[in-house]
Amino acid sequence: MLNIRNYQDIDFSGVQMLMNRSNEFDSFSWPLLREKLYGDPDWNPSRTWIAELDDQIVGFMLGVTRNIRGTNYGYIKLMGVEPSVRRKKIATQLFSTLESQFIQEGMNIFRIYDVPLNYYMPGIDPRYTPAICFAQKMGFTHFGDSVNMQVDLNDRDWEVSPQLEQLKKEDISIYRATVEDKPELFGFISTEWALWQNELEMAYRSKPVSIHIARYKGKIKAFSAYDGNNQGTGWFGPMGTHPDLRGKGIGTLLLYLCLNDIKKQGLKTATIPWVAPISFYSHYANAKIDRVFWRFEKKLTNV
Ligand SMILES: CC(C)(COP(=O)(O)OP(=O)(O)OC[C@H]1O[C@@H](n2cnc3c(N)ncnc32)[C@H](O)[C@@H]1OP(=O)(O)O)[C@@H](O)C(=O)NCCC(=O)NCCS
């Protein structure tokens, strides 16, 4: 008999095994899955659902919420059903439970996977065709795509020390962010890029801090980071340059500093996730589109 209940800490390894068995294009290490659950700024086991069949975990659905510019979003952040018990409405039952909860909590929009602040992938990889069919059946509409790009770190040398020396003559200093820089950096992103705060918080917890900043005439005008999400996988971003400093190649140098660090971690590739400026990364880092994701949305209220 199927039992739908809330996640408890003791379920962690069962969920990890289930996610690895059910998501054939992905892999969930212990630290990565812990980050997705316990590292989420909205982590709440009461929105995290387990389907149990004869005391075995056979289904998992992680729900999280965000308020973005006044709109309440509910998300499925991760899901999986044991391959041997598919097409038995297990995901449907998990979904109905989560959807009712989101409606009760006043969520306006329901989305799948593309969760700002902390996410695994920015949408559903369409190779997970059953998940696409499932989203459609549950009443979601495909509203856009997102892409991840991949950089081959052995493609070239990412060393930029000579360029950094040159820039000092223009009163531009680029260096690894320190704790002392944190208040100014968070002030810098607070207007346009407030949604990146969580990733920078995470990057500040890395050792060494996985953020590089550029100061122009003493003021922070650009930054780049990695390991702010999906830590340990070579996850680049976020990155931003103030208009005052655009066009000087600063973004490229900041990108290379991060790629160099990721390479030094022993990784062969870096991921540039949820990319908007595809041509920038293609041109400067020979990054290739590696995965495509479909974004789905279901309106729960009339906003
Ligand atoms: C997506 C997934 C969670 C669905 O779980 P499930 O318990 O088998 O789903 P349900 O039985 O509740 O299916 C509900 C509906 O989804 C659709 N659906 C599910 N699997 C389908 C498939 N293989 N082909 C076509 N439609 C499918 C159907 O419309 C189905 O309703 P129906 O059986 O009445 O036709 C499961 O296939 C899975 O774990 N996939 C791998 C993990 C994954 O894709 N995660 C997302 C990665 S981005």
Image: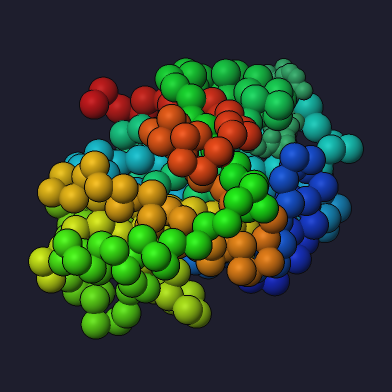
Is residue 163 or residue 27 the one in the foreground? 163
Q: Left or right: where does residue 246 sit relative to residue 204? A: left
Question: In the rendered view, would you say 68 is above or below 17?
Answer: above
- Which residue is depicted at the point 38% across and 55% down? 253
Is residue 85 or residue 164 the one in the foreground? 164
Q: Residue 167 placed where, x, y %?
A: 25, 62
Classify the position of the N terminus by image quarter. top right
Residue placed furthest toward the bottom: 180
Q: Residue 215 placed where, x, y %?
A: 20, 66
Is residue 185 or residue 154 the one in the foreground? 154
- Which residue is depicted at the point 79% across and 40% down? 24
Question: In the rendered view, would you say 267 is above or below 275?
Answer: below
Question: In the rendered view, would you say 297 is above or below 156?
Answer: above
Question: In the rendered view, would you say 246 is above or below 43?
Answer: above
Q: Left or right: where does residue 82 sit relative to residue 122? A: right
All told, the count of numbered labels is 0
Res 123 seen here: no
